[in-house]
Image (cartoon, rainbow, N blue to C red):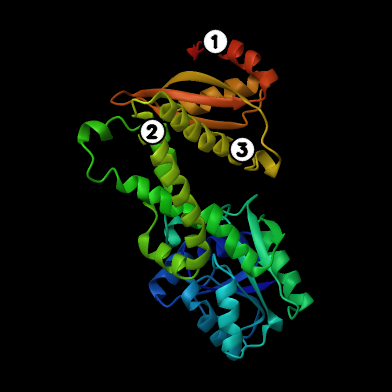
């Protein structure tokens, strides 16, 4: 791939363009808002000038409702040898293209499962897709050349290609992406009118659950409007669990011992099923989750502290598998949790203590 056209310079489009441009591809940028294309070009994502002729690959990075029309327009003017989109739903755009009478031989639907709660070209990152799944949904009509171009795109962006049926993909993202967004927003909405005293008690748990609630509403309206049925199906199952959990909690208030025991059993059931589901979430490098241990250290909020503790861990020969910081309310300090292999935890704790770090047992 030597040339590409990226249509839509939001977070995903600009991140794709940055990744391609950094690896030697000449990228042309287009957006219905020329100012966004100029911004992306100013970031080094390519040029907002039109290409002289057909490019190797056109990447359509617009909201799902506009994918088919945008692709059809690019196909009509012969903009590229191959065409793909990066929308987060796949079945609807493909059917829309069919309804428009487009030749699907030169097209493949794709979806990089990467993103941020921020949007727009200024939030873009050339490394956004590194190590992340990138779904490809070829049909029987997809030409081999187009599939190869899509695979090359994923490789240049350092993503991990995953081939799926379009409708199976839409059911999957309803479960692992779209429903979590709504539930995160629902939990965060409870904070809107909460007492200030309650909000001040917010800790890492509420931060984890509500992080994606900061996402831009219009973007999610576009996404959910393109995949409402599968999301509604998942939410209906969640609603059934909620109803049972409410019933169990009410039973725990009963004066009847048998009802309280029944309520406790109901709560235990949903918690155990949650444990089982969480264990299926892939761990590091996509492998099965490993059993790690956490070394917790009190750390000051001063420049260079994180670099120093990571350097000390490196000197001890310990690889940090994951890290989490819990900030202390009203203090210039917090706790850093260093996740490591179980056999490495005692050595890391010893080494950090020797270097003056206050390790918490």
Q: Which mark is residue 325?
A: none
Q: Which mark is residue 251?
A: 2
> Is 38 placed above or below 282 here?
below
- Badge 3 marks a residue whose secondary structure is helix
Residue drawn at (74%, 71%) of the image: 147
Q: Is residue 201 left or right of residue 67?
A: left
Q: Which mark is residue 353?
A: 1
Query: Could you say which quadrant of the image residue 284 lies in?
Result: top right
Residue drawn at (68%, 66%) of the image: 136
Q: Residues within 10 Å of mark 3 (few under 14, many from 20)?
A: few
The CA span between labels 3 and 1 is: 36 Å
Residue drawn at (67%, 25%) of the image: 341
The percent coordinates of residue 126 (x first, y second) are 56, 55
The CA span between labels 3 and 2 is: 25 Å
Name the one closer to the observer, 266 or 354.
266
Q: Residues within 10 Å of mark 2 (few under 14, many from 20)?
A: many
Residue drawn at (56%, 76%) of the image: 93
The percent coordinates of residue 311 (x first, y second) are 58, 24
Image quadrant where one finds the N terminus: bottom right
Q: Is residue 162 visible in the rendered structure shown here?
A: yes
Name the one closer to the observer, 114 or 232.
232
> Is 281 placed above or below 347 here?
below
CB within 8 Å, label 2 to label 1: no
Residue furthest to the right:
144
- Label 3, on which residue? 276
- Badge 2 marks a residue whose secondary structure is helix
Front: mark 3 or 2: 2
């Amino acid at each position: 791939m030597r040339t590409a056209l990226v249509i839509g310079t939001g977070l995903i489009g600009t991140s794709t363009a940055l990744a391609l441009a950094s690896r030697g591809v000449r990228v042309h940028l287009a957006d219905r808002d020329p100012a966004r294309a100029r911004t992306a070009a100013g970031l080094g994502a390519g040029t907002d000038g039109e290409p002289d002729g057909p490019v190797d690959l056109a990447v359509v990075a617009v909201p799902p409702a506009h994918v088919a029309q945008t692709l059809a327009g690019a196909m009509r003017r012969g903009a590229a040898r191959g065409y793909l989109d990066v929308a987060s739903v796949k079945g609807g755009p493909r059917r829309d293209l069919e309804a428009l009478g487009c030749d699907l031989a030169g097209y493949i639907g794709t979806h990089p499962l990467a993103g941020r709660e921020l949007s727009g070209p200024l939030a873009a990152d050339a490394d956004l897709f590194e190590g992340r799944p990138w779904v490809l949904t070829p049909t029987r009509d997809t030409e081999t050349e187009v599939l190869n171009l899509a695979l090359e795109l994923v490789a240049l962006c350092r993503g991990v290609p995953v081939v799926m049926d379009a409708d199976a993909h839409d059911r999957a993202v309803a479960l692992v992406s779209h429903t979590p967004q709504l539930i995160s927003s629902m939990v965060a909405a409870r904070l809107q009118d909460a007492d200030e005293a309650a909000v001040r008690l917010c800790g890492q748990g509420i931060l984890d659950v509500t992080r994606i609630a900061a996402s831009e509403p219009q973007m999610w309206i576009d996404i959910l409007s393109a995949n409402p049925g599968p999301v509604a199906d998942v939410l209906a199952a969640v609603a059934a669990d909620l109803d049972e959990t409410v019933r169990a909690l009410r039973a725990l208030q009963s004066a009847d011992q048998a009802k309280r025991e029944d309520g406790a059993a109901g709560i235990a059931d949903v918690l155990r099923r949650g444990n089982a589901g969480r264990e299926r979430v892939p761990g590091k490098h996509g492998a099965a989750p490993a059993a790690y241990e956490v070394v917790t250290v009190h750390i000051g909020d001063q420049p260079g502290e994180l670099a120093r503790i990571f350097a000390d861990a490196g000197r001890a020969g310990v690889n940090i598998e994951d890290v989490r910081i819990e900030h202390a309310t009203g203090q210039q300090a917090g706790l850093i949790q260093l996740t490591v292999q179980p056999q490495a935890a005692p050595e890391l704790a010893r080494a950090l203590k020797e270097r003056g770090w206050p390790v918490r047992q």
